[in-house]
Image (cartoon, grey):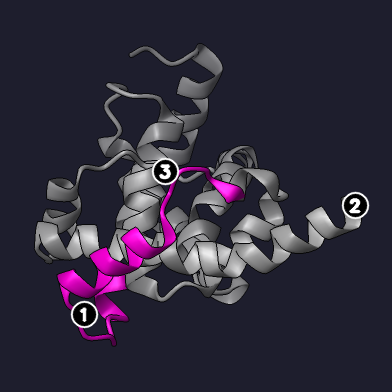
Amino acid sequence: MKHDTAEHTLIRDCIKGKSAAQEALFKRYYGAMMQICRRYASNPDEAKDLIQDGFIKIFQNLEKFNGNSSLQTWMSRIMINLAIDAYHKGKKHQIESLEESFSLAEEHGYMDNPLMHLEPEKVLALLQKLPSGYRTVLNLFAIEGYSHKEIASSLGISEGTSKSQLAKARAMLLQMVEPMLNKIVHELE
């Protein structure tokens, strides 16, 4: 994939260590990269740490960008991989049984996605309340499009655990969303 001449110049100047170019690249992609970090982080401070580490890694490895994808896609992959690394470092929970999670999934059902009725900031706040493992699996599966096999490989867990964590994340989100939706419906009546 080719990138435009202005972007090519910006990349070249960043590789040369020109601070104005690095600042321009940072400002250009900060919003998109912060959205990724906020989805994986449990709080704003953690998101800020992720984005800072991510841009450091981007600048250190920019010469490896080969243009086979867009620059934003390449940068996003770095941010996601850092979030996965952070998950590994912060892994404090024990894996719960697969049977328990599937019973929760059946109990709550997933016919309609109630998150679609909420403002994006409220959805993000709910995501940040999820335990790290649940949040990471949900992001990788639902947003990044990873398969359970890819998630298992990335996180060093089994495919069953990936499915279990996804089911539990969905169940927890539904539990958190239900009172909010009931309030909205009540206000409309």
For residue 162: magenta?
no
Is residue 28 positioned above or below 94 on the image? above
Q: In terms of depth relative to the viewer, which is nearer, 31 or 97?
A: 97
Quadrant of the drawing holding the N terminus: top left
Q: Which residue is mark 2?
A: 189
Q: Which residues are magenta?
A: 87-114
Measure the alpha-carbon separation of dots 1 and 3: 23 Å
| Amino acid bearing label 3 | Ile
For residue 98: magenta?
yes
Q: Which residue is mark 1?
A: 96
Q: Residue at x 73, y 61 (%)?
A: 182
| Amino acid bearing label 2 | Glu
> Dots 1 and 3: beta carbons under 8 Å?
no
User: Residue 22 at x, y = what percent?
Assistant: 55, 44
Q: Which residue is mark 3?
A: 143
Measure the alpha-carbon separation of dots 3 and 2: 34 Å
Q: Residue at x 58, y 75 (%)?
A: 45
Sequence order check, earlier mark of 1 and 2 = 1
Going by the image, does 150 lie left or right of 69?
left
Q: Quadrant of residue 184?
A: bottom right
Q: Quadrant of residue 95?
A: bottom left
